[in-house]
Image: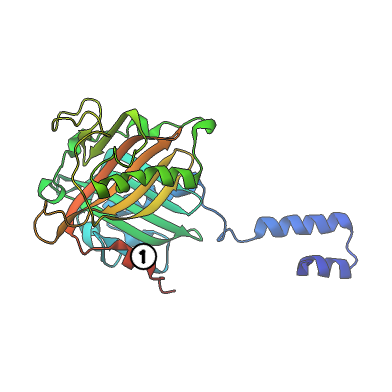
């Protein structure tokens, strides 16, 4: 079907040349609101969010009508929670940029009254505005079980490395490979599910090396696949982002009750999986002990109000 501009031009007897000029101008002038947010755009939204956070200026951000904000799976108003107390950004920042879904996520270390806080942020960008903000803030070892923020100075080479195009899995395949991890946790064995870890695969949780070459945390932890793990029969998870250019899958997990963290408690874990060449090469996570009843799927499954 011809556009109204074309029809008007034809009825007016405009020349082909002039018609082309009009069409070109209309294309350039068309609103960019519906355009995709590319990697640079998503990275910029994260930077703007972090800058606004430590400046305590949520009003400086382009926020969509009805946008949702959560901290530790509790719905708040943007500007509440860590927004009131964050004072400084440290050097560590690991992004996951999902252009296909308009999602930008990052693991960062910020300061609150001079003390470090491990912060996970997930932003959903719609029409060049922030429509969703999901965060997890870990302030100490009591909250996080493990806590070594000073070990997180720069993003890891393993996560930041860009695989060759021939090594990159499709989005669907990358998710399938990453989901071997919660499957292994569920039955208490990565060997049983035959999780596809590379020989040098490692895991870092809250800044602590908990599996892979060089791990000394407990006996056998130097091999992530054969390392002894307990069963997590109540584990649930959702895929939060897939960085198709870097080969990173971000999954949010609720480990469920295992009688390991006190009655009614579970670990809420955000895991980044480096996936390429059909294998999981690295796992980097921020995690926090919280009530096992917390289920972020309930919050984000409900459409936001416009």
Q: Is residue 27 above or below residue 41?
A: below
Q: Residues within 10 Å of mark 1 (few under 14, many from 20)?
A: some
Q: Position of residue 210 (x, y in %)?
A: 20, 35
User: Relative to 93, does residue 157 appear above or below in the rendering?
Assistant: above
**Is 305 left or right of 24, judged from the image as shown?**
left
Task: Give the total number of marks visible in the rendering.
Answer: 1
Q: Position of residue 187 (x, y in %)?
A: 25, 48
Judge left or right: residue 296 versus residue 96: left
Q: Quadrant of the C terminus?
A: bottom left
Residue to which mark 1 is pinned = 300
Question: Which residue shows up at 31% across the image and 52% down it?
Answer: 252
Residue 245 percent coordinates (x, y): 49, 39
Does any portion of residue 88 appear in the rendered image? no
Residue 186 in sight from this viewpoint: yes
Instruction: Determine the residue positioned at 33% across, 42% down.
Output: 193
Q: Is residue 18 above or below residue 10?
A: above
To which quarter of the image does residue 177 belong?
top left
Residue at the spot x=23%, y=59% of the render? 72
Q: Viewer-proximal residue, 57 or 182?
A: 182
């Amino acid at each position: 079907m011809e556009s109204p501009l074309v029809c008007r031009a034809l009825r007016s007897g405009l020349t082909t040349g002039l018609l082309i000029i009009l069409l070109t101008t209309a294309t350039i002038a068309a609103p960019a609101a519906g355009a995709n947010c590319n990697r640079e755009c998503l990275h910029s939204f994260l930077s703007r969010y972090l800058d606004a956070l430590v400046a305590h200026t949520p009003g400086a951000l382009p926020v969509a009508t009805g946008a949702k904000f959560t901290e530790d799976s509790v719905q708040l108003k943007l500007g509440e929670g860590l927004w009131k107390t964050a004072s400084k950004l440290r050097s560590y920042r690991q992004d996951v940029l999902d252009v296909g879904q308009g999602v930008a996520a990052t693991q960062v270390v910020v300061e609150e009254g001079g003390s470090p806080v491990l912060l996970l942020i997930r932003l959903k960008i719609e029409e060049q505005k922030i429509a969703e903000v999901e965060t997890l803030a870990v302030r100490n070892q009591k909250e996080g079980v493990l806590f070594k923020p000073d070990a997180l100075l720069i993003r890891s080479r393993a996560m930041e490395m860009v695989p060759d195009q021939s090594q990159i899995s499709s989005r669907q395949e990358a998710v399938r490979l990453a989901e071997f991890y919660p499957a292994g946790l569920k039955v208490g064995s990565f060997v049983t599910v035959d999780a596809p870890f590379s020989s040098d695969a490692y895991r870092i949780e809250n800044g602590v090396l908990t599996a892979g070459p060089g791990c000394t945390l407990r006996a056998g932890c130097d091999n992530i696949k054969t390392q002894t793990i307990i069963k997590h029969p109540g584990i649930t998870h959702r895929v939060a982002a897939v960085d198709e250019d870097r080969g990173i899958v971000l999954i949010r997990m609720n480990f469920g009750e295992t009688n390991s963290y006190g009655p009614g408690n579970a670990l809420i874990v955000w895991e980044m999986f480096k996936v390429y060449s059909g294998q999981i090469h690295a796992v980097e996570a921020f995690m926090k002990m919280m009530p096992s009843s917390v289920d972020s799927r309930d919050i984000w499954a409900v459409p936001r109000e416009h």
